[in-house]
Amino acid sequence: MNHKPVIALAGNPNVGKSTVFNELTGLRQHTGNWPGKTVACAKGEFIRNGKTYTLVDLPGTYSLMAHSAEEEIARDFICEEHPDAVIIVCDATCLERNLNLVLQIRQITNRGILCVNLCDEAQRKGIEIDFTLLSDLLQMPVVPCSASVKKGIKELAATAVRMCEMPSQLLETDNKGAAKTTITVSDENNIRPPLHDEHLAVSFIREAEQISAQAVSQNPDDKRRFNHRIDRLVTGPRTGILLMFLLLMGIFWLTITGSNYPSQLLSRFFFWLQDVLMDAAVAAGMPAFLREALILGIYRVLAWVISVMLPPMAIFFPLFTILEDLGYLPRVAFNLDYLFKKCSSCGKQALTMCMGLGCNAVGVTGCRIIDSPRERLIAILTNSFMPCNGRFPTLLALITIFFAGATAASSLSGALLLALLICLGILMTFGVSWILSKTILKGMPSSFTLELPPYRHPQIGQILVRSILDRTLFVLGRAVAIAAPAGLLIWILANTYAGGQSLLQWGTAYLDPLGRLMGMDGVILMAFILGFPANEIVIPIILMCYLSTGMLVNIEDYTQLRQIFTANGWTWVTALCTILFSLMHWPCSTTCLTIHKETGSWKWTLLGILIPALCGFVLCTLVHGIAILF
């Protein structure tokens, strides 16, 4: 059996490691411009000279001293899996800091290749690197690269192939004057270094400083340019939070404004197709109960979910990814880190909160970047306080109908109110995190390295591919898979009668006292319960119950929606309590399953359901009680 040489890809976060991986293998590995985004090994293959090479993308890490899961994974793979070559990707704009990892890897294997990425950015910043001298000082091949524009990738692959094919021979690299040296590669590698050795760590830092001082030069006038001036605003104590709020409101405004018309077109198309399918089913002689269950039950719910979810996600995710590519999200974590420390939590939780805005299940998965198990649990249990994309339709509809108004300025005012709701969710996250850290999850906040990467030009092509394929269609596909059986269940409950009432009506009547206590009614509570598989169907279920149609109702006109709601006893208090409960209630079924997968415990999963639901119940009851008094 032919042996496939294995090449490990290591490096600090934010050095373009995943971009190098993508260019070498052709895979769409997700790249993110914040620390710790990659937390597991991704594998790919590339072919050179008719031979297949396996490339393993290790988690981004600053060190191999095993202080975190990322460091352990990277260190153990290099030490125990014995890769035939190790490509260490570094950022040319901050080489000194990156060399610390290079020197650690050099100690445990002499099969390393230094890939100095982002050379184009370094050139724009007036940074000059003597690659020949750098190679001589490190005694390893050095390849300059600008992976985002595909420069140096072929030379890097060729160097890695030579390293794999000549493990016991003299290896000469010649990258057009960039690196030209001769080193001996033997089999005496993969020795595990001593861990947590402070003296060794200091020696690495000093050696990195010495090497950088010799091989790197920079115009002193260029050291405090664009990044520093912008960061004074973005991370300033007075301007940072304000700018974050304005950016959040801007994203929501663009999402609301841009998604209205596509949503209407999709809705009309899918419901036109429903009539076509119904006529075809009748013509084919399909039994009435079967065609209604399939078309008016399953298909109608799917049509609603797709038409409501797809346009906002197709706008929100690219905008969010642009902020990610720009390097703004680590600055969000920087702005919120102090507040999370006050809650005895971790500043990385700010990043998982941002991910939860798109999908809470993704946010829960992203909590892997938090090293402390205690702080990771806090982040998981509070992630659902950030309203996901599936809750936006309910929030936007009620905000528009009862508070913003259907005027030309409704999109802007709606975005403002939605941004304020997000801020309320952030405050609830702080409060609940503090309570958890003082009760069942006691402990001191841990420290972590937070890198503020340089601002970079977003790669629009990659953003569109990643945000549409990796995020939008992924989340939509998961919602569709869950909404289909939910549609069948809703149809059965609405069309199965006992004592002159449908099972759905029996359920709403049973929940009505509790709903009234919370400023809502039994229909609204039942809609949230049946919306457990997909939050997008809450409003349609409410309409189905009020109109007694036996199937989901599609009403696009907000004036007509307001008339239906007010005719069933709604006031602004009802709308406000429904909005607050939509912000704070149990997470969807996908998120609950993700919580169980990440924690391995039904106890924590149940707590992840009860915490936001209890907060929503208390807040709605208080608001309703205050409204009655005043």
Image (cartoon, helix red, strand yellow):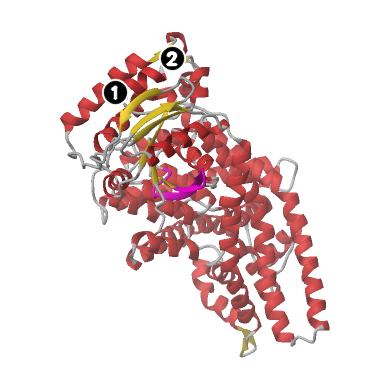
The magenta stretch spans residue 44: yes
Relative horizontal placement of residue 47, taking residue 134 as reference (left or right): right
109 w.r.t. 29: above or below:
above
Mark 1 is surrounded, within 10 Å at the Cα level, by few (under 14), some (14 to 19) or many (20 or more) other residues, namely many
Residue 539 seen in render? yes
Farthest bottom residue in view = 499
- What SS does tag 2 mark? loop
Relative horizontal placement of residue 446, taking residue 565 as reference (left or right): left
How far across and down, in percent of the image, does residue 400 sit?
A: 67, 50
Residue tagged 1: 208
The span from disc 2 to disc 1 (Cα, nearest Å) is 19 Å
How far across and down, in percent of the image, does residue 99 sit?
A: 33, 27
At horizontal 46% and vertical 62% (from top left) the residue drawn is 586
Mark 2 is surrounded, within 10 Å at the Cα level, by few (under 14), some (14 to 19) or many (20 or more) other residues, namely few
Give the magenta part as a residue range.
Answer: 37-53
Residue 552 seen in render? no
Question: Could you tell me how many numbered marks the image carries?
Answer: 2
Give residue 223's mark: 2
Farthest front residue in view = 169
